[in-house]
Amino acid sequence: MTRFHHRLHADKAGREIFVEAAIEAADSVDNGLELRGVESVFVGNFSDDVFEKQSHTGAMMADWLGLNPRPAVRVEGACASSGVAFNLGVQAIASGLYDVVLVGGFEKMRSQTTEQVTDALAMAADAAYEASVGFTFPGLYASMATAYFHKYGAVWEELAAVTVKNHRNGALNPKAHFQSDIMSTAAKAGESKGIKFKDELEFLRSSFNPVVAYPLRLFDCCPVSDGAAAVILAGDDVARKFTDTPVIVTGIGQASDTLALHDRSDFTSMRATRVAAESAYRLAGLSMRNIDVADVHDCFTIAEVMATEDLGFFPRGQGGKAAVEGVTGIKGDKPVNADGGLKAKGHPVGATGAAMAYEMFKQLRGEAGDHQVAGAEVGLAHNVGAAGATVTVQIFRRG
Amino acid sequence: MSVAFTVQAFNEGLSQGKLRGNRCMKCGRLHLPPRPICRGCGSRQLEWVDFKGAGQIEAFTVIGVPLSGFKEMCPYAVGIVKLDEGPTISGLLLKEKTDDLRIGDRVQIAYVKGQDRTMLGFRAA
């Protein structure tokens, strides 16, 4: 995967960062893999139509990777686009049609203003019945947060614990968009105005952290990033040709839900996450207790809290407390988003699901560097489209 | 011939001061906005229903970074209201001061005239 960043890829087009990620994937194969050995390509992308005025990006990537006439498709499931692309790649191999496929995703968002990005992201919600009354995408998650606080008596400080943890993790990940923890960020921000913050919460409560959609502040939201990620999938019977230490996909799941948040019976939990996870756990023959490391979809801090409950890691209403108590830290009992999560690693929408698979590959081979979870053997990736209308879950095991 | 259950028909209802959804004639489930297929039983036999527009706030937010079409209103509150008839729907929450909104607050429908359309809103009952 490329580093996720707001400036680094300013001079490159989407196709160029995708090719960069695909080349890294192919070149990192232990026993070598010619890109030409890829039989089909699945490209996750949310909105290049808007961001770069470019559609038809499946064929474009096959073209730019020198793979014509092999089939390629662009997959769109909002922020879960490449989580869906990944599952389709697994299904294509399981069908027996292909031995080797490339799945990935990309998004080039930073050519747009904040207002244009806000408008584009709202397209993933229900344009006719949500955006029409002024709901922004952060606004939908903010509404989940007010409902969650009300139901469980939870407080914003629990969300702040997610922010602090994920920025701390991002500082350990060279691919992350933000590579500084909250105290370093606070020190730098305060310097210009001669302010010294005594702790993270003082900074996060300050005017340096304005409200985007109450109760969510800027640091409750993932950044707008450019980036691409890609992984190679190979069938069981050929994988050992390429490496002695493959990472095995042992379970996948996907579910849908209503596009409009208001059409659901519960705003504090995502049914699609529960259904997708149930499928992945069942196929893998594992339960939440077996998961050593997880990347969950934290586009907003409240999303991580809800995800850790819906995946079964913690009881309902306890996800925030788990973050406060350090249970989800890299050295905690249930490490979540050791790579910084969307919150600090960044969220080039269409690249995120593939970047989670990339992270699991590194973690389970013990190659995650400074953010390695010690001894991780089983990992889980959880990718959410918009406010939970598309969700994918994958379970991985060290081979 | 009856009017199709479309976004356009729903919006025309709003412009006439009506909150219109539909009811499944097989299982009785209510839908707001109207849908072509019942979410409960899959039936395609549905009939129009006018909602009274009274209900309570189930979830809300106050937007600090708005959509391009809502800049002049910012900051504004928006949320999800559970109507007394059962269904929940998104709407603007009209309030002078947005800092004392509470989940459970009783609200009543307000039709908010925009430049070229009428938006669904609610104000304190």
Image: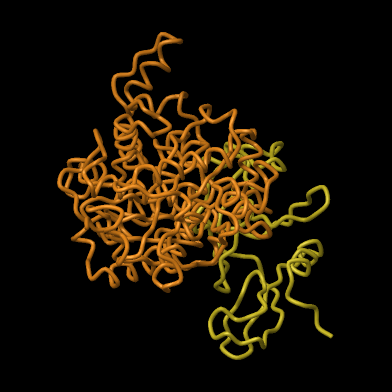
Chain colours: A orange, B yellow
Of residues B117 and A312, the one drawn nearer to the viewer in this rendering: A312
**Horizontally, is A370 left or right of A194 in the view?**
left
Asked if one can make out residue A127 in the rendered structure from this viewpoint, the answer is yes
Horizontal relation, residue B79 to residue A284: left or right: right
Look at the image and tell me whether residue A271 can be seen. no
The image shows residue A5 at horizontal and vertical percentages of 48, 32
Where, by quadrant of the figure, is residue A279 drawn?
bottom left
Q: Which residue is nearer to you in this view: A194 or A398? A: A398
Out of B62 and A255, give the one closest to the viewer. Answer: A255
Residue A206 percent coordinates (x, y)? 42, 25
Q: Image point 63% across, 60% down: which residue?
A: B108
What residue lies at 52% left-to-right and 38% top-to-bottom?
A17
The residue nearer to you, when weighing A62 against A377, is: A62
Q: Say above or below: A114 vs A48.
A: above
Residue pushed farthest bottom?
B26
Rendering quarter of residue A332: top left
What number of labels is visible? 0
Q: Quadrant of the C terminus of chain A?
A: bottom left
> Residue A391: x and y, percent?
44, 61
Residue in the image at 58% along x and 32% along y: A12
Q: Compared with residue A306, is residue A332 higher up or lower down, i.e. above or below?
A: above
Image location of residue B45, percent across then percent down: 67, 88
| Quarter that holds the N terminus of chain A | top left
